[in-house]
Image (cartoon, helix red, strand yellow):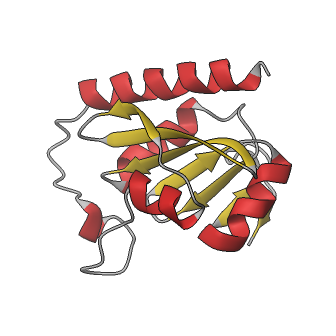
Amino acid sequence: MTIFPRLAAVVLLAGLAAACSQGSGSGGGPAGAGGRAGAAPPSVEQLAAKVGCKPRIQVDAAELRTGYCRTPDGEFFVTTFASQAGKDAWMDAAPEYNPHLVGNLWTVLSGRQVLDLLRERLGGDLHLTDHRTKRMKVVG
């Protein structure tokens, strides 16, 4: 499978970019990042546990964390973000890796069949095309 080495590369690049651009001064932490006030977004480990996986952490930075999972459903990457701005920057850097499952300050990357199975347990919206185009299709 060639998609996973490319996914790992984009995850690593996004982690490096987020670590380098961290000092925005906005103070946008999880509570102010578009989620429910006072509710912390789930961690990589919490999301992975919902689908029966103990993730291998690939990126562990202040702005984002990524873990790799392999389950009977398939292989996938779970990424969580410290801020909505970080999530937006990551999504802008990885539009060609579609589809992806998107939730509150998290995303999961894999093939469509795997994401359909994971969505039943994780929720989120399934993004099927580049989110920056007018033709974006979101299955909600």
Residue 111 falls in which quadrant of the image? top right
Q: Which residue is rendered at x = 26% and y = 24% of the image?
A: 20
The image shows a total of numbered marks equal to 0
Q: Residue at x 83, y 49 (%)?
A: 112
- Residue 64 in the image: x percent, y percent? 35, 41
Coordinates of residue 59 in the picture (x, y in percent): 38, 31
Give coordinates of residue 119: x percent, y percent. Answer: 70, 66
What x and y, as percent, mark residue 117? 77, 62
- Does residue 136 lie above or below 8 as drawn? below
> Residue 124 lies in what quarter of the image?
bottom right
In the picture, measured across the screen, residue 60 lies left or right of residue 77, that is left
Task: Tell me, yes or no, if residue 54 can be seen here.
Answer: yes
Q: Residue at x 80, y 60 (%)?
A: 116
Is residue 135 among the parts visible in the rendering?
Answer: no
| Along the line of sight, the residue nearer the viewer: 64 or 54 | 54
Q: Residue at x 39, y 69 (%)?
A: 34
- Asked if 7 appears above or below 128 in the picture, the reply is above
